[in-house]
Amino acid sequence: MCATDREQEYPTSPSLQIDLKVIKYDARGKFLGWEDVRGETLQCTVEVSDLLRRVPEPIFYELFLQFEDEKGDTRLWQVPVNNPAIRTNGQASSNPQMLRRLFLVDGLSGRKYNLTNTPASVTLAAELLLRLPAAVASAGVNEYQVWCCWDIDKAETNSSCFTCLSAQIDVSFSVSYIQSPGTAQQATDIAFGVLGFLALLSAFLETGTWVRRSRLPNVNFMIILKFFAFFAGSLANVFFVVTLGIGIYWLIVFKGQQVSAVEMMLPAAGSQIETNFIVYLLCAFVLKSVNIIHILITQTTVSIFLIDWEKPKARQTVQASTGNQGAASSVSAWRTFLIANEWNEIQTHRKVSPSLQLFAVLLLLEVVGLKNLASRDLNVNLNPDPNDYQAPWSPILRFGIAASVWLAVWIVQVVFSVGFYERFVEDKIHQFVDLCSLSNVSVFILTHRCYGFYIHGRSVHGHADVDMDTIHSYFRKEEENLCPLRGLEANSEVQTFEVLLTDKTRTLYDRITQSSMEVCFLIIFCYPLQYAPKFHPGFIHGLKNNFLAILCQVTKILKSLNFIFRLWQVPRGKHVRSDLHSQRLKGYHALNRFLISFLEHRYKDLDYVVKDKYLMERILDMEFQEPGDINILYNDDRSLFSRTLFYNHELTLVLFDILLFSAVDLGAQDFVLATVVTFVAQKLLQMLRDALGRRNLAEKTLVEKQFLI
């Protein structure tokens, strides 16, 4: 039979029961009759002596498939036979020839010298495989096209190894359903093309927004680095969406079939579809890890300052340790410490509980038994008998069921947290804004050079450093509407804003903060040199004379590493000159006075306006209008300042958890181990964010690290 015969087609129905018939011939070619192929044991162990006793001479079979055509007439179609054990000139053929006949046991050709002698070897079909492509249903079509092929694997028993008649051979019969990938890979490629283009467009928009907010005139290395960071995050989402779609698709289509009508088959183990899926999943995990690193760097390098609106009630003269007279304000610093501690606490606050998430996912997968849906068979029993046959796991189905359970539990948690818990129990983000108003402290944050957020915490009562009775009286006034609203503008309750500064304002802001940088430079470099006898005095004098030039160069190199502000948190027991501390405090008070004057419209050339963003600006998260000569504060009713916290990146964090969980399970095939590894990674990420955020907060707000509990 030629190879093209295997492409022969015949019509069937979805509920077809395959009816096979064979024609039997003896070794002399004599016709022995027709016989129906009946179901027997699929896998067993038999002795060679039993086979020879039952089949002393080989019987040849021609296999036919019996079916009815459209007219109801009975038809026969011969099934081609492929024997991969056949060798041509000692080598396997690259293009195997399809055969008409097959035999199951051959004890005749192994008899030497005389046909009555005991066979030296027995050839038998140890593995029989009936390959049937699964029919693919299409809309409006009621017929399916199927071809089948019979594969035989040859096995020999050699009497030199063991007694031939007492040898035991494992024989098996199986049916393999093969399905052409068809348009599945094409659909995946199209999805990657479309979503990849959208990811590229999103990265360009985010980079353009970052450049506009940073006021960078020329393309530099930092812009290119930012583009790749944004593109990595967007591309990770594309890979995740595609892999999730593939997993859920096969989970629904394959597991949703009934055993009597199998139309779709799962991609075979090691097939190109499964290999591509694993590559997509690993790419998503790597890119999402880059996205998480980018978020960590961005959040732990923001510029944050706590504006204290409290005015001193009285001033008193105190004697400093150096013998100089100075004026000390009666304003307490504990309110600023309180706000700094609350900000430090909410830095790693999330909308959901990661530990509860892991517990619920593991409970559903292992205890409820949803993991059993990931087997390669059509069994949908969640609690199968341990003694029953367990089909191998499919990585596509394991990811599909695991990711689906993760997202389902996460959505339930988010809905409960946002819809109930934050509304009726506790909302830490809005409570922080209320605490700022109670403490008479505002928060000024710059995430870009000329863009950031402002939380207006100025008390409507003028003072917050008061006793308990006065605070209760303040609350009663607010309840009875006997005081102004808390908003920045009159008759407004909006306390959170997006800030868009002009270059002039930012330049003045940097000039004021420059004094703090100079102090840090003195502490780090110049002050130790005064106690270093190995340096010539002229070198130290020249260093001080060229201080500004040296400071400019050092600032450019060390600013990205956040090293300039390192000495704001002075270790205990270190001796630091009091005049340097005094200069640091002067820089802090100067910046505090500048921001208060700026917010009170005292600088006409640095004035600002408060306005709402357009709808498209809110959707695209960018500003169409250039600030020009006036600063802009956009009303923010969505608490966007939480972008500097974990709270606003919940989706990114949960996708990272899902991908890490799936990547570990992909290698270990163990949901328990994946849960443990994910839990440890969550804790390490939280500890790293907390440590770096606390350090940055201590450096930028002048609150000692020891006070951040």
Image (cartoon, helix red, strand yellow):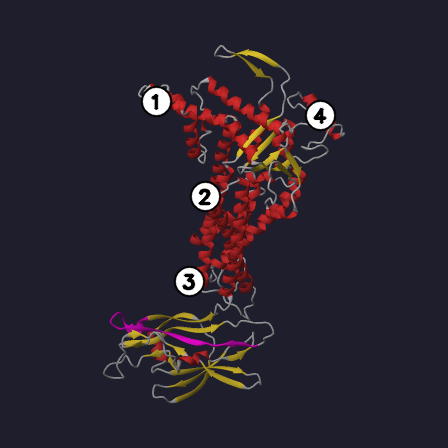
Residue 452 position within the rendered picture, expressed as x and y whole percent measured from the top left: 57, 37
Q: Which residue is mark 3?
A: 270
Q: Secondary structure at mark 4?
A: helix
Provide the residue designation for mark 2.
Answer: 220
How far apart in space, not on screen, are marks 3 and 4 (Cα)? 71 Å
What is the x, y in percent for residue 133?
48, 72
Q: CA distance from mark 4 to mark 2?
A: 52 Å
- Looking at numbered disc 3 in the image, what kind of residue is underneath it? Gly
| Circle 2: element type | loop
Q: Which residues are magenta?
A: 143-167
Give the Cα separation between the discs numbered 1 and 3: 70 Å
Picture residue at 52% right of the left edge, 36% below the top: 302
Q: Is residue 98 left or right of residue 397?
A: left
Which sits earlier in the primary sequence, circle 2 or circle 1?
Answer: 2
Q: Is residue 159 magenta?
A: yes
Count how many numbered circles sit on residues in the image: 4
Circles 3 and 2, Cβ within 8 Å, touching? The answer is no
Mark 1 or mark 4, which is nearer the start of the sequence? Answer: 4
Residue position for label 1: 539
Numbered mark located on residue 213 in the image? none
Q: Secondary structure at mark 1?
A: helix
Distance, label 3 to label 2, CA atoms, is 45 Å
Foreground: 608 or 266?
608
Amino acid type of disc 1?
Answer: Phe
How far is mark 2 from mark 1, CA to CA?
36 Å
Which one is closest to the eye, mark 3 or mark 2?
2
